[in-house]
């Protein structure tokens, strides 16, 4: 009995629901005055394909979609009015012949937009049946009439789509939903290293106290690992240098495009040298020992000791071969009175002997001649010292030892101190790179003068001056640091970046004064796009970062990849030689949100030679290989990889890329 009652209740409820629905439908179809019912008008819609670009003349496709003409509408013509932003103008109207039967389609400018008329020349009725192509009535080709400079968003709107009915009132489409947004989102702006400049050498990270090692056709650049420090409120604070226990390394075979090799854990709990707390101002050397390449990395443990690590490649991994300082006040003869035990430099002489130069600081009252610079011979094993450290009498010595042998002469270079009171007219200016020469690696030394003014003279932001001079491809260069990148980021608070400029040795042995600048040095050769290139090889960039991952791909193992990729970010390579042409482009990437890589020539909005969709595979997350065809890549160009995707989302990580020849 209970079940029967329950069944009757359900039937009654269903009947009531149907009655309510029927009432609503009837009410919705009633004309405002009651009685005769009305039919909802057909509707029109808009779709936009393409995107605006910086240069004038960039094109968009505006697709006008509409419901079919109702059977009772015998239209002599269709007329549309499309409201356009003032930076767009109509270039062409392409009717869809699969749906629209009208042999005359014209357009003309109208107030704030364009007027489009569709009709038949013989006066017969126009038909629009929607038999194909997704309700497409026509496509309007729009072009920008001026260049765009900043981010913008504008609306395109159909104000009217109307059928002309002979002898009757015209019939209008519902165009309330026929709107579309056109946006211009410029690529991210480069900060610090601006194309086509070469300085600072990279803009995605800092790098201070540069030192170089040339090996196997590449320049390896080792740096103190400056990173932003923050206060409790999350604001960038002045660089304290106290927590720096890593060194960074980048390399290049052309001096403009640099490969990021990540960092070396030198000191502290995770470092190779557990006895040390900091790692500053590295020096590097290479020597073949027992038929094997060995690479030696010297570093300062703040200003207390100098240590040494050894590795089998220029980028490590490195190990501590002695488990203690190489040079210390307690155990090394001749250094007890050195104020600062830091800033090493190493010379490999032609006879196979090696020497280490170091020291700095200002004993009270001795600014004019501090006598805190030192030189010692290194043992044959490169991890020991021989004899007693000798004083280098460098006038107004402050820090930053450098050493080079050129045309049989030894050049000792250093940074002068900032004490003004002790200076005379003949004294070297403060904070500049000075040099001395000798016919022997241990001296005696003759002071010659200064060659590089303080960074503040060139870049408007000062600080200490740290350098290294090196030879590459028969030319000499100086690496030095300045706070240009941190200044461009709004935080010139002791965070430094490396720069390069050319060095000229005159015939008489003098060094010509060096002009520091943002332009940097000329690229040595061109970049090969057909090699398998680390994605963390960068000429210029905007927005991206790099990180070390443990297993980017099975073939490579741990590597540095490009990360923090967002919409509008990009990276670029200088003077890429495509030769006769490229056919395809391939990457190894790990998808996050996913997005697109646009391949462009010579600027972030230059000619597009291809694009690659980066999305998850059927196998889900993880590293995957993707490729796409390219067209128009030939000769030498700057190559830009421009990243597009959902705003604010991390799009993907990029490990490597490679073009194939056509």
Image (cartoon, rainbow, N blue to C red):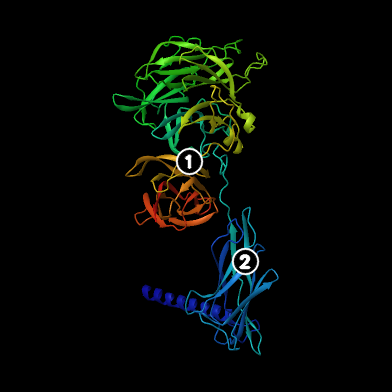
Name the one closer to the observer, 216 or 374: 216
The image quadrant of residue 166 is: bottom right
Q: Are marks 2 and 1 in contact (CB under 8 Å)?
A: no
Rendered location of residue 502, percent (x, y): 54, 32
165 w.r.t. 185: above or below: below
SS category of the residue bearing label 2: strand
Q: In which quarter of the image is the C terminus?
A: bottom left
Find residue 115 and report its horizontal and vertical position in percent. Answer: 65, 74
582 w.r.t. 279: above or below: below
Q: Answer left or right for 220 relative to 457.
A: left
Residue drawn at (61%, 73%) of the image:
175
Query: Tag on residue 257?
Result: 1
Q: Residue at x 45, y 76 (%)?
A: 14
Residue sitting farthest toward the left: 290
| Residue at image mark 2 | 156
Task: Specify the farthest residue to the bottom.
Answer: 167
Binning the other alpha carbons within 10 Å of mark 2 as few (below 14), some (14 to 19) or many (20 upward) gives many
**On the rendered structure, is 580 left or right of 160?**
left
Q: Is residue 530 left or right of residue 168?
A: left
As helix, strand or loop, the secondary structure at mark 1 comes to: loop
Distance between the alpha carbons at the discs numbered 2 and 1: 43 Å
- 537 or 270: nearer the viewer: 537
Residue 18 spot, x, y in % from top left: 48, 78
Q: Residue 150, can we see it?
A: yes
In the image: residue 218, left or right of residue 182: left
Quadrant where the image shows the N terminus? bottom left
Question: Does residue 615 show up?
Answer: no
């Amino acid at each position: 009995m209970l079940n029967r009652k329950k069944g009757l209740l359900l039937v009654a409820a269903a009947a009531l629901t149907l009655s309510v629905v029927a009432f609503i439908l009837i009410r919705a179809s009633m004309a405002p005055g009651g009685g005769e019912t009305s039919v909802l008008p057909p509707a029109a819609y808009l779709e936009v394909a393409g995107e605006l670009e910086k240069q004038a003349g960039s094109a968009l496709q505006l697709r006008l979609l509409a419901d079919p003409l109702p059977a009772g509408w015998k239209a002599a013509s269709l007329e549309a009015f499309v409201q356009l932003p003032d930076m767009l103008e109509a270039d062409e109207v392409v009717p869809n012949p699969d749906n629209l039967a009208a042999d005359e389609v014209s357009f003309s400018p109208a107030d704030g937009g364009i007027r489009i008329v569709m009709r038949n020349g013989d006066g017969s009725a126009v038909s629009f049946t929607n038999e194909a192509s997704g309700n497409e009535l026509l496509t309007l080709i729009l072009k920008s009439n001026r260049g765009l400079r900043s981010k913008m968003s504008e609306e395109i709107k159909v104000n009217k789509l109307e059928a002309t009915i002979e002898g009757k009132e015209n019939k209008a489409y519902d165009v309330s939903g026929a709107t579309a947004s056109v946006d211009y989102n410029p690529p991210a702006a480069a900060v610090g290293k601006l194309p086509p400049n070469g300085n600072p050498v990279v803009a995605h990270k800092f790098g201070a106290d540069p030192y170089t090692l040339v090996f196997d056709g590449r320049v390896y650049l080792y740096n103190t690992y400056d990173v932003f420090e923050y206060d409790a409120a999350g604001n960038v604070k002045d660089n304290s240098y106290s927590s720096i226990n890593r060194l960074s390394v980048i390399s290049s075979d052309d001096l403009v495009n640099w490969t990021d090799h990540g960092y070396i854990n030198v000191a502290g709990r995770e470092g190779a040298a557990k006895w040390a707390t900091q790692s500053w101002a590295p020096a590097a050397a290479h020597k073949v020992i027992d038929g094997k390449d060995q690479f030696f990395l010297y570093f300062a443990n703040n200003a207390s000791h100098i240590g040494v690590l050894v590795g089998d490649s220029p980028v490590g991994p490195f190990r501590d071969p002695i488990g203690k300082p190489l040079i210390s006040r307690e155990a090394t003869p001749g250094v007890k009175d050195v104020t600062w035990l830091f800033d090493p430099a190493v010379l490999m002489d032609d006879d196979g002997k090696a020497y280490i130069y170091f020291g700095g600081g200002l004993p009270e009252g001795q600014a004019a001649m501090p006598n805190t610079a030192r030189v010692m011979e290194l043992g044959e094993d490169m991890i020991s010292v021989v004899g007693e450290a000798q004083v280098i009498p460098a006038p107004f010595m402050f820090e930053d030892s450098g050493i080079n042998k050129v045309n049989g002469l030894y050049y000792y270079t250093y940074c002068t101190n900032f004490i003004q009171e002790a200076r005379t007219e003949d004294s070297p200016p403060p904070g500049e790179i000075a040099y001395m020469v000798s016919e022997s690696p241990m001296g005696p030394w003759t002071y010659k003068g200064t060659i590089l003014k303080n960074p503040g003279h060139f870049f408007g932001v000062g600080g200490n001056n740290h350098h290294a001079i090196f030879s590459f491809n028969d030319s000499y260069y100086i690496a030095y640091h300045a706070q240009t990148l941190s200044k461009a980021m709004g935080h010139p608070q002791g965070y430094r970046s490396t720069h390069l400029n050319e060095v000229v040795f005159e015939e008489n042995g003098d060094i010509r004064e060096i002009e520091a600048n943002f332009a940097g040095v000329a690229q040595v050769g061109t970049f090969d796009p057909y090699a398998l290139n680390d994605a963390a090889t960068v000429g210029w960039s905007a927005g991206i970062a790099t990180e070390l991952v443990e297993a980017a791909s099975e073939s490579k193992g741990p590597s540095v990849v490009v990360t923090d990729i967002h919409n509008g970010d990009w990276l670029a390579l200088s003077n890429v030689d495509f030769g006769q042409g490229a056919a395809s482009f391939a990457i190894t990437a790990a998808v996050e949100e996913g997005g697109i890589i646009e391949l462009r020539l010579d600027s972030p909005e230059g000619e597009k030679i291809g694009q690659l969709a980066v999305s998850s595979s059927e196998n889900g997350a993880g590293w995957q290989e993707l490729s796409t065809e390219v067209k128009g890549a030939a000769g030498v160009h700057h190559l830009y990889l421009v990243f597009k995707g959902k705003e604010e989302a991390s799009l993907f990580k990029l490990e490597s890329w490679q073009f194939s020849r056509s």
